Image: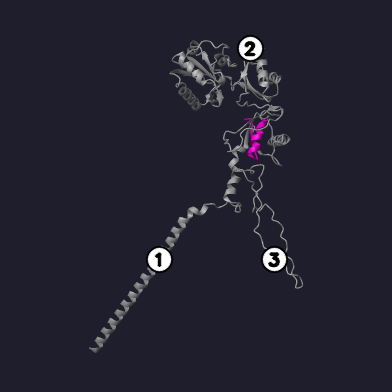
Amino acid sequence: MEEDDRKHRDSDRKRRRSRSRSRDRRRSRSRSRDRERRRRSRSHDKDKRNKRRKPYKYWDVAPPGFEHITPTQYKAMQAGQLPPSVPGDPSIPLPPLVPPPTITPDAPPVPVIPQLPPQIPPLPTPPIAPVGSQMTRQARRLYVGNIPFGVSEEAMVDFFNDHMHESKLSQAPGLPVLAVQVNHDKNFAFLEFRSVDETTQAMAFDGVMFQGQALKIRRPKDYQPVPGMSETPTVHVPGVVSTVVQDSPHKIFIGGLPNYLNEDQIKELLSSFGTLKAFNLVKDSATSLSKGYAFCEYIDHTKTDDSIAGLNGMQLGEKKLIVQRASVGAKNAQQSQLAVSVPGLELPQTSGPVTEVLCLMNMVTPEELMDDEEYEDIVEDVKEECQKYGLVRSLEIPRPYQGVDVPGTGKIFVEFMNAVEAKKAQEALSGRKFANRVVMTQYYSPEKYHRRDF
């Protein structure tokens, strides 16, 4: 009996110990889980803190190689105002180190000179923008058309670099032209210069002769002006006649030119009154034949009136020249006789009666009319503007077609309800600008208009 009681007590003791150990284990696991939770919580908080700091990671951090440049200096460099060499640039050699004096026991004490804070030299102002800046690449390129057949890229680079130096348009030692890309199939090239200002000055070579060809130099289509910098050259290169005549009070219109006269013959005629700065004979884009009118400008503006007085009314073959300032329509919009003198467009040389049909000229080119979307935009713009002066009954803009000579291409015909409304439109539109061209006007015969005799 006693033996049974002892076994029972031992069994209870073991169960209690086992429960105690189990509780200890549970507490230990619980504490372990708590520690793990706290660790994960701290890790989560840390991650959250890191995430909150992430947006500031890229603020005011200099690009590789520009660690010693302040953000203000870097912005100035991007805008082409500072050179790439600045204090701290590894390309700038550091001054040689002076070894400290050797001190001996017998030597007198070296006086202590208070050290002044190092003086940072001012940044030099460069004559040109930094080479190869992507920010200014569009403004550092030029389109060159009418290049000689088979010309090499090296020949073009050498030609422009030599001419830039000879004309003193290069602003620093070295080569102004960095690269050239030639398209032999379409007969044009792109030049890339090292600075924006040199690119602009190089436009003065528009019309320069290269291997017997007069080069046409233009801005590329993706050109974007750089704020604060000139968009036109400030110099004229002697011997070069530009192919672009800029709008100005000194721009001259020459009409009634016989179609058989070529550019050199017309320039020779005009040059008898003075040296030409710019000249442009307007040609048909499809046939490259003269349309019978041209524009020019003299270097000496005092020669403008002399040439007008000497050439206007001159008989050339079966035609008489009509020579006047291109801006005359803007100054004398209400004088019908001046509105008629738009020559070379085969219009009658007398104003005739005021009619309800108004012919607008010098507004569009055949190239613009070829594009369907651009054609629709032109129609919409012209109609919307003309409706301010009266009810537009109809509107015709003859379009060119490949291989077909379409009469009236380049003119716009607007039919109003009556002649009074047409006169209001003529007075308001003559001399205005459309697509950066001066608008010229002429009343047109309604009978011809309805017969589509353009």
- Which residue bears the numbered disc 1? 38
Mark 2 Cα-neighbour bin, 10 Å: few <14, some 14–19, many ≥20? some
Q: Nearer the viewer, residue 227 or 265?
A: 227
The reply to whether the magenta stretch includes residue 196 is: yes
Foreground tag (2 vs 1):
2
Determine the CA span between mark 3 and mark 2.
Answer: 96 Å
Q: Which residues are magenta?
A: 185-205
Q: Which mark is residue 181?
A: none
Above or below: residue 416 compared with residue 126: above
The residue type indicated by label 2 comes to Lys
Nearer-N-terminus badge (3/2): 3
Q: Nearer the viewer, residue 273 or 449?
A: 273
Image quadrant where one finds the N terminus: bottom left
Q: Residue at x 68, y 22 (%)?
A: 302
Quarter of the figure with residue 13: bottom left
The residue type indicated by label 1 comes to Arg
Figure colour scheme: one colour
Quarter of the figure with residue 217: top right
Mark 1 Cα-neighbour bin, 10 Å: few <14, some 14–19, many ≥20? few
Mark 1 residue element = helix
Q: Position of residue 339 (x, y in %)?
A: 55, 16
The reply to whether the magenta stretch includes residue 115 is: no
- Which residue bears the numbered disc 2? 319
Image marks 2 and 1: residues in contact by CB distance under 8 Å:
no
- Which residue bears the numbered disc 3? 112
The residue type indicated by label 3 comes to Val
Image marks 3 and 2: residues in contact by CB distance under 8 Å:
no
Q: Position of residue 143 (x, y in %)?
A: 62, 33
Q: Position of residue 231 (x, y in %)?
A: 61, 34
Nearer-N-terminus badge (2/1): 1
